[in-house]
Amino acid sequence: MSLLATRLDRLSHISGSDRVATDPAACERYAMDGVVPQAVVEPENPEQVCEIVRWARAERAALLPVGSGCLLALGGSAVRIVVAVSLARLNSLLQYDPGDLTLGVQAGMSLAR
């Protein structure tokens, strides 16, 4: 088992093995400034996101949080990305108050939705 596979084993336990991708085609989609992550993980709930952040801290792994991925070119330049965290599955409407014209959504909710 490679070093990367060993490090990602715990990540697979957190989010489910079908939610962690390491194949180059999946990872290339999340490249930022030409830096391609070694893996992509898609958590299903905020608790999994917290566990992924804890994992990254323990592993000293750089995370790249990604919403739709359409604006990855904006912001600071990436030096190193170990895991891209796709927030696409966290796309629920949490609260809507029509009287105040406000709503609360999860991080993966697109503006179009």
Image (cartoon, rainbow, N blue to C red):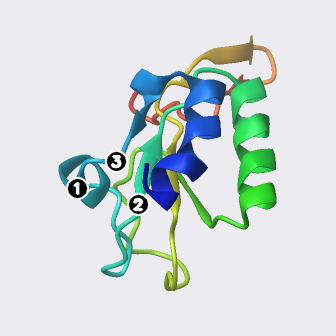
Q: Which numbered dot is residue 22? A: 3
- Horizontally, is 68 left or right of 65 in the view? left
Q: Quick one: quadrant of the C terminus?
A: top left
Which residue extends farthest front? 1
| Residue 61 in sight here | yes
Under tag 1, what secondary structure? helix
Under tag 3, what secondary structure? loop
Gap between marks 1 and 2, in whole Å? 8 Å
Q: Residue at x 39, y 31 (%)?
A: 112
Would you say the residues marked 2 and 3 are in contact, meaning their CB atoms lie under 8 Å apart?
yes
Gap between marks 2 and 3, in whole Å? 6 Å
Amino acid of disc 3 = Thr
Q: Residue at x 55, y 83 (%)?
A: 76
Under tag 2, what secondary structure? loop
Q: Position of residue 88 (x, y in %)?
A: 46, 32
Mark sitting earlier along the chain (2/3): 3
- Horizontally, is 92 left or right of 30 in the view? right
Q: Determine crowd level at label 3: few under 14, some 14-19, many 20+ residues with C-alpha closer than 10 A.
A: some
Q: Nearer the viewer, residue 71 or 63?
A: 63
Q: Where is residue 42 in the image (x, y as percent from the top left)?
A: 49, 33
Q: Is residue 102 above or below residue 37?
A: above
Q: Is residue 83 above or below residue 78?
A: above
Gap between marks 1 and 3, in whole Å? 6 Å
| Residue 97 in sight here | no
Residue wearing tag 2: 38
Q: Is residue 64 above or below residue 79?
A: above
Q: Position of residue 10 (x, y in %)?
A: 64, 37
Residue wearing tag 1: 24
Which residue extends farthest left? 25
